[in-house]
Image (tube, rainbow, N blue to C red):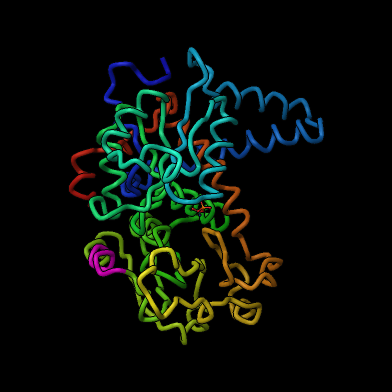
Amino acid sequence: MSFLQKNDDLKKYSIIDTRQFKDPEVLDKVLNLASEMEELSDLSDNWIRNNELHDSEKDRLVELREKLYLSDYPRKPIMVSLFVQPSTRTSFSFTSAMKRIGGDVFGSENAKDFSSFAKGESIEDAAEVIGGYGDVIVMRHPGDENHPGNKVAVNFANSCPIPVINAGAGTDQHPTQSLLDVYTIRKEKSRLNDLNVAFIGDLKNGRTVRSLIYLLAQHSNNKIDLVSTDDYTLKLDMKEWLREKSPKTGIKFYEYDIDNVVDVLRNADVVYMTRLQKEYETGRTDAANNSAYILTPKHVSEMNKDSIIMHPLPRVDEIDPAVDDDPRSKYFEQAKNGLYTRMALLNMVLTEKHGITDWEYDSEKAANSYK
Ligand code: CP
């Protein structure tokens, strides 16, 4: 049988921490599955929009459908979408992804107000209860005093009888974003090692930055340039983690003030822009200011011809829209890649038919933080 077995410990299929994908070979298989999902989506879209497929393309579409649809289930598998923080890309791409592989979706896009979290229900009780209604839960949560960072996702997953996918946890982790980020990098640069990646903007609050760094650090000879103002530097725990990792994979990191951004841009293979996350700076009177970070066509003219510009989005004003037409700008493709990556992840979490193992969630390791 290809769907998950009744007696399995379904928790082990959760995706909570980017470090579950630390083995480059396992990651490669996941990205290959996402690549097939892209092919499936392209062929289906072409068929729907143009009704024009060659015979060989029709055969390929049938082959991919047989392999990738969740057709072995006795009913449509159900994804519960539980977002306690706003989202466009993650929420909608997960919903589209589930429907594109034959599943069903229900949930709340404003679970903070329209679920019993508003009445004070605990994370653990909510997980136990909602886990009885679906086959997989996709959850985003900002964290709180009792559950800072990824702890909220860990506690939820550890109390839930079905697999949970972390769709963003506070300022800590956004594992599915980092997987779509490496999918984009591999597609554009054909490698995940020997890369010079510049992260620019709010490196303190950016969960996408942290999650992507975890993955880049597992591949050989990558160099990370961190560009921010003093107020928004990468947190100390991440720098310590990188120093520990360095002897194993050769990962190196350097910090720069925003005044040196041009030097950094000249040497980057990948420029990863981020917005200032004002939602985490509510106590500040000196309101966070994006103006220090705006990437303009003048900056881009300093970059290598084959470098790429990424951004997890949403963008506020840190990339001048005049940069959008530059062929090196990949942020909208990156958002689209989220669809294929999430199709692959849902399929992988809900079936065992692709034989991709060794990424499975370890609730004890997660509770003590993965290394
Ligand atoms: N990149 C990202 O997580 O976007 P959303 O907040 O729109 O989901």
Along the line of sight, which residue is nearer the eye, 344 or 161? 161
Q: Quadrant of the N terminus?
A: top left
Secondary structure predominantly adopted by residues drawn in magenta: helix
Per the rendered image, the range of residues in magenta is 235-241
Residue at the spot 44% in from the left edge and 44% down from the top edge: 113
Instruction: Give percent across and percent down for residue 118.
Output: 37, 43
The residue lying furthest to the front in this view is 119
Instruction: Give percent across and percent down for residue 259.
Output: 47, 87
The magenta stretch spans residue 240? yes
Quadrant of residue 330 within the rendered picture: bottom right
The magenta stretch spans residue 325? no
Residue 287 relative to residue 187: left or right:
left
Residue 233 relative to residue 182: left or right:
left
Residue at the spot 58% in from the left edge and 30% down from the top edge: 99
Quadrant of residue 162 within the rendered picture: top left
Residue at the spot 29% in from the left edge and 47% down from the top edge: 152
Whether residue 2 is visible to the viewer of this picture, yes or no, is yes
Residue at the spot 32% in from the left edge and 52% down from the top edge: 143
The residue lying furthest to the bottom in this view is 259
